[in-house]
Image: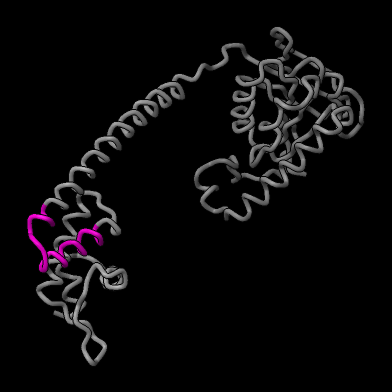
């Protein structure tokens, strides 16, 4: 039997058969033409290999069993039978232990899934902290914006209309500052941790980005007095700061800018859950 027919008979690839030959699981006859001829003994060995793999024996363990099987032609058959029984019992014990460990892991995983699904959500609505209100200036006139129809709750401004005498207008809605400058905004960006975007990134790029993020965090931590207010642009595409907020001074103020109020709201909601006293302003604005 040629190698192609042999592989097809056992539903494996030709490369698999060649590998089994290389590690001496199979011992076919090699003809002068350099082609392999698979004997009935090879068929018997391959059937044995397939059966043992179903019992989760490793190829190295199967090789040892085949060596015993081949030498048994010259020794007492009961010896090889006893060896098989011992290996089978040992494998059974290991599988039972693996099963117990797997069941424990599945139980812990189920509890983790339940805890993630039942993750507590903050009930208190957050908005623009009052500490940011003196910073809201007209981008054209460079003078403070006037505030109308403000809705306040606790230490936050949840909604309001902002305007300037030059006719510039902005709005605070659901705690996010919405600017009127949207003509240069992108329309098709998605949040940076979405599964589809992750598939497009190479591991080298991700690791390089991580090194850059760590350098930035170390720089911020080493000179906290110089960074009392930190701005992160394009926060609806990718954010660095949320991972390091816990290690930065609590009085630090943050501004997250992006082109999507929906994605900024998701970011605000998440950060509000994890950092209840965070001083953060979320601005929907143009890229530029």
Which residues are the magenta region?
Answer: 62-81
Closer to the camera in the image, 36 or 192: 36
The chief SS type of the magenta part is helix
- Picture coordinates of residue 128, whole percent (x, y): 73, 19
Residue under the point 23% across and 43% down:
90
In this view, which residue lies farthest toward the top?
154
Closer to the camera in the image, 169 or 41: 41
- Picture coordinates of residue 26, whole percent (x, y): 22, 71
- Picture coordinates of residue 249, whole percent (x, y): 79, 23
Placement of the N terminus among the 4 image quadrants: bottom left
Residue under the point 68% across and 20% down:
175
Residue under the point 30% across and 58% down:
60
- Picture coordinates of residue 199, whole percent (x, y): 51, 51
Residue 190 lies in magenta, yes or no? no
Q: How many marks?
A: 0
Image position of 222 with respect to 184: above or below: above
Image position of 284 with respect to 194: above or below: above
Placement of the C terminus among the 4 image quadrants: top right
Image position of 131 with respect to 184: above or below: above
Closer to the camera in the image, 115 or 270: 115
Query: Is 197 on the left or on the right of 117, as rendered?
Result: right
Residue under the point 20% across and 71% down:
7
Query: Is 268 on the left or on the right of 196, as rendered?
Result: right
């Amino acid at each position: 039997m040629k190698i192609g027919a042999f592989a097809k008979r056992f539903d494996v690839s030709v490369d698999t058969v060649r590998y089994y030959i290389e590690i001496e699981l199979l011992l076919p006859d090699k003809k002068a033409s350099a082609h392999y001829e698979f004997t009935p003994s090879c068929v018997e060995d391959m059937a044995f290999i397939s059966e043992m793999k179903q019992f989760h024996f490793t190829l190295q363990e199967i090789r040892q069993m085949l060596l015993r099987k081949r030498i048994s032609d010259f020794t007492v058959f009961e010896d090889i039978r006893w060896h098989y029984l011992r290996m089978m019992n040992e494998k059974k014990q290991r599988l039972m232990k693996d099963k117990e460990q797997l069941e424990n892991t599945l139980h812990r995983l189920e509890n983790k899934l339940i805890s993630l699904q039942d993750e507590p959500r903050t009930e208190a609505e957050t908005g623009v902290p009052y500490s940011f209100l003196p910073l809201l200036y007209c981008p054209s006139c460079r003078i403070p914006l006037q505030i109308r129809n403000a809705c306040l709750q606790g230490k936050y401004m949840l909604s309001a209309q902002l305007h300037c005498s030059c006719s510039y207008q902005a709005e605070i809605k659901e705690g996010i500052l919405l600017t009127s400058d949207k003509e240069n905004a992108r329309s098709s960006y998605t949040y940076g941790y979405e599964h589809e975007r992750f598939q497009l990134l190479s591991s080298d790029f991700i690791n390089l980005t991580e090194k850059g993020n760590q350098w930035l965090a170390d720089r911020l931590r080493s000179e906290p007095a110089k960074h009392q207010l930190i701005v992160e642009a394009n926060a609806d595409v990718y954010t660095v700061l949320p991972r390091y907020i816990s290690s930065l001074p609590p009085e630090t103020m943050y501004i997250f800018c992006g082109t999507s109020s929906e994605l900024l709201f998701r970011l605000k909601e998440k950060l509000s859950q994890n950092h209840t006293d965070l001083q953060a302003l979320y601005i929907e604005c143009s890229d530029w």
